[in-house]
Amino acid sequence: MGEKRPLCDYGGSPEELHSGDTVNTVTSDPGLLQNLLLDVILSSRWNAKARREIVNGFTDGLYDSTGIDAGLSTYTYDASGDRCLQGSGSGGYSSAGNLQAASGWTRIETASAVPNGVTITTVGMYSTTTTGSLKFKIALYNGGDSYTLTALQTFTKSASGYQSFTLSTPYVVPSSGTYYLALYLDTTQDNHAYAAGSRALVSGDITGETTTIAQSGYRDEVAFGYIMNAIVVSTATTALATALKAMAVILVESYHSSLKVYFSSATSPSWTELTTLVKVATPLSSVDAYVSDLTSVTGSADKSHRLKITFDAGNSTAIHGFTLKWTV
């Protein structure tokens, strides 16, 4: 590239990219690297500002979540740490029922399907009975009255009210098909069911494919908690010109190899991965800075520029901020 770009005093954003820049350029040019890091750390994080537009780019230190497009993202925002974590959610029912649930039946709670692609980490049930073996299962709906049941884990009821249990092996729900939580009871449970909702029943402690009895007007008080792969999508910036190449700087706590970064310039996003993430610094305690290569991207007349960050559920990765820069 020839010249070295000077360090700025942070009165602006002089860290213009050149079309031939690469990760190697960034790591070998102290001025360019320092200025890219100053954008995401000083302007957004330490000065307690939300997302900020810069020359041919934008930066967000995640002081709040206003720069994240909630409609395109699945994540959890931790306001105490100014960071984005994996997504989480829950389903089923966990309130007090008013009917007995007889022992000896496997019950499929068909009123609340489990979302596809999530990882179930906890299961639970409500009952005022304080004893009994609880055999949780997952049920795949085959059509008609047919289900295929797979055992999850067995727990022991030990208290009155709602109890939640953590699966020793989390269950990853397949990306297609309709799945429900199921439960076999070996002890009659009081106040465990409602005269509302829907369920399917089969006699005995069943696994594998089976034919059930559909029962409308009843539901069992079972619930589940899950985590989701993180998808963090920025709100769009309408650029003055369509990007030719793009580069990202990401502040990451507990980096995981599943982390990927993408760019789009279309109103309806069409993503291009920004490849070759390289750790270049540790600017904050336990937080590393990763820089992508300057990647050729497919431009759109929309000039609606966005950044997307993804990583798998089940690890402690957290995003503390990011800068997106592009060339035109």
Image (cartoon, rainbow, N blue to C red):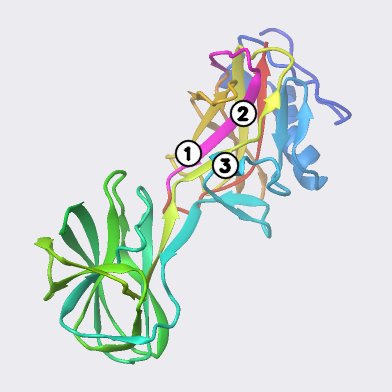
**Numbered disc 2: secondary structure:** strand
Q: Residue at x 70, y 12 (%)?
A: 241
Specify the label residue 71 is tagged with. 3
Q: CA distance from mark 3 to mark 2?
A: 13 Å
The reply, left or right, for residue 193 in relation to residue 64 is left
Of the two numbered discs 3 and 2 on the same chain, state the one appearing first in sequence.
3
Asked if marks 1 and 3 touch (Cβ < 8 Å), the reply is no
Q: CA distance from mark 1 to mark 3?
A: 20 Å
State which tag comes first along the sequence, 2 or 1.
Answer: 1
Disc 1: which residue: 259
- Tell me the kind of residue under disc 2: Arg
Badge 3: few (under 14), some or many (20 or more) residues near its Cα, within 10 Å?
Answer: few
x and y percent of residue 255 in the render?
50, 44
User: Magenta includes 305?
Assistant: yes
Q: Secondary structure at mark 1?
A: loop
Dots 2 and 1: beta carbons under 8 Å?
A: no
| Mark 1, other Cα within 10 Å: few <14 / some 14–19 / many ≥20 | some
Looking at the rendered structure, the kind of residue marked 3 is: Gly
Is the residue under label 2 in contact with that under label 3 (CB below 8 Å)? no
In the shown orientation, is residue 56 left or right of residue 251? Answer: right
